[in-house]
Image: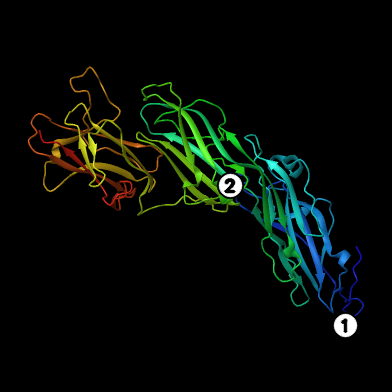
Amino acid sequence: MTLALSLVFLSCGREGCKDVLHGPAISFTAADPQTKAFIEDINRSGNELVVYDYMTGIDGTLTVAPEDRWYIDHSRIHCTVDGQQVWDYVSGDEYFWLYGSNHSCFGWLFTGPSGYNTITFFGEHPHFEKDTFTLPLPAYKFTHASPLYDFLYSDVTKRTYTQTNPDSSPIDLKLNHLFSAFRFTVRSVRQAPVTISSAVLKVVTQKKATINFERAVDTVTGGKPVVTYTEIASDTLYLGGRNHKLTSDSAAINLFDRNDVQAFRMIWPQSEEEFADAVLEVKYTDANAADKNALQTKTFQLNGFSQKEWLAGNRYSYELVFTDKEITLTCEVLRWNRKEIVLDFTEVVVVSDKIQWHDNTISHLDEHTGEVLLFNDKNKPAECYFKLDAPQGATWTASLVPVAGINTDAFEFVDPDYYDPYASDNYKVLTENPSGTVGDGKIARLKIRVKDASSQTNTNKAKLRIVVKTANDSQTIVVENLCPGHDYNEYTLVQNRI
């Protein structure tokens, strides 16, 4: 390339003269987008980026002809060793900092993990239109078999190289995600098995996009380019595999990735208008239903949550839970650059599942007062479940606390896993309050019954209290947020007067 240079010389002797126009080589490093769905670290051997440098000169120091301003033009850089911070040029070429130059650098992913690259993903390499500073991407349709290839593109990074500020450190390309991602995990806490027959996610699966790097022309500001998405078609994504049986003891499954319960699937961002039609439809059979083989259908409108769209660079983690009374769907929105951190909660109890009472094991639940009316029958214990995630390693214990001096001894805990239909007493009474370990991933289950139905003369009551004792026995914490959506912190067990 030929540069029209306005030369500036330093006064120096022949042996000590320095070429003030020529600085060190230009190098690049990539800022890790930290996506668990695509790649844990961008600095992995085999990954490649395509990079550009649009260079202009400072008047009186360096003049660059318009035809020469694409100083680095579609050059590929690659990581050759895991963890490598500064990447090498694939071609072996070198580009140098020139005194008095302004640089606008950017790039995008060319080859990603497992060898996937732009041509294997889109069917062709995108062609950068230098006259308009735009990168039109071919239309692409996501399917269940689509590779987990997230197209990454960088911000525009500005750098001026002068004698007074000769910054030759590597150009840091901060990467952005073109796509968003989702996952749907499902589990059941029902006693009877639930079998998932099919799951269908209806979203916009085919789009094309144009990335506009016009900010590279501005010699002052850099920042994120503008991305325009164009919808082509909506379609459906189907459950991987069929007939997944779920019980209260089975692990959660990922509806759209059976190989990894934690995996996310790539998808185009969904605008608010597009997301209005996004639904998840689940078909299942319930062994506890009147007709065990009857196929039931549950449809969820995804814009029923507070977020009304799916944004690029966000992960949307949904959890579907079959409880005794209903099927719940919750959603957590995660930024892709949120690191996975195991927190040590020493004074805070994290409740992942609030108390739920199993259908047909209680006579009545008063949602306004929190009073749970037990059957006045030793052979009909009330059963509930809950789950605590933190502080990990702590011990939870359930107890029955007197209410205004009324007889708490009218109730007792029984073993939730023991039942003998041939014994005089079908249930085994626990001699100690039930307890368990916090953060072990297990659902805690309790069974509580009345001791004596025939001699009952007054209405007996007791508070169901769950406490957590930290691993070092430093404190005992009363769990107060176990009652979903109510002002009261604990349920009150009630035995009817005869």
Q: Which residue is the extreme one toward the top?
A: 422
Decide if residue 285 is on the left or right side of residue 373.
right
Residue 136 lies, with reference to residue 460, above or below; the image says below
Spot occupied by residue 450 in the image (x, y as percentages of width and height): 17, 33
Q: Nearer the viewer, residue 354 or 276?
A: 276
Spot occupied by residue 196 in the image (x, y as percentages of width and height): 48, 28
Spot occupied by residue 355 in the image (x, y as percentages of width and height): 32, 41
Q: Nearer the viewer, residue 188 or 464?
A: 188
Q: Is residue 25 visible?
A: no
Q: Amino acid at mark 1?
A: Ser
Q: Amino acid at mark 2?
A: Glu
- Near mark 2 (Cα within 10 A), the count class, few <14, some 14-19 or many ≥20, is some
- Among the 4 quarters of the image, the one containing residue 171: bottom right
Residue 325 lies, with reference to residue 231, above or below; the image says above
Write the residue at 81% across / 69% down. 56
User: Quick one: label 1 or label 2, which is nearer the N terminus?
Assistant: 1
Spot occupied by residue 93 in the image (x, y as percentages of width and height): 85, 56
- Among the 4 quarters of the image, the one containing residue 20: bottom right
Secondary structure of the residue carrying tag 1 is loop
Numbered badge on residue 314: none
Write the residue at 38% across / 47% down. 390
Decide if residue 447 is on the left or right side of residue 457.
right
The residue beneath circle 1 is 11
The residue beneath circle 2 is 274
Looking at the rendering, in which quadrant would you find the C terminus? top left
Q: Estimate the spatial distance between the alpha carbons at disc 1 and disc 2, rounded to whole Å.
A: 66 Å
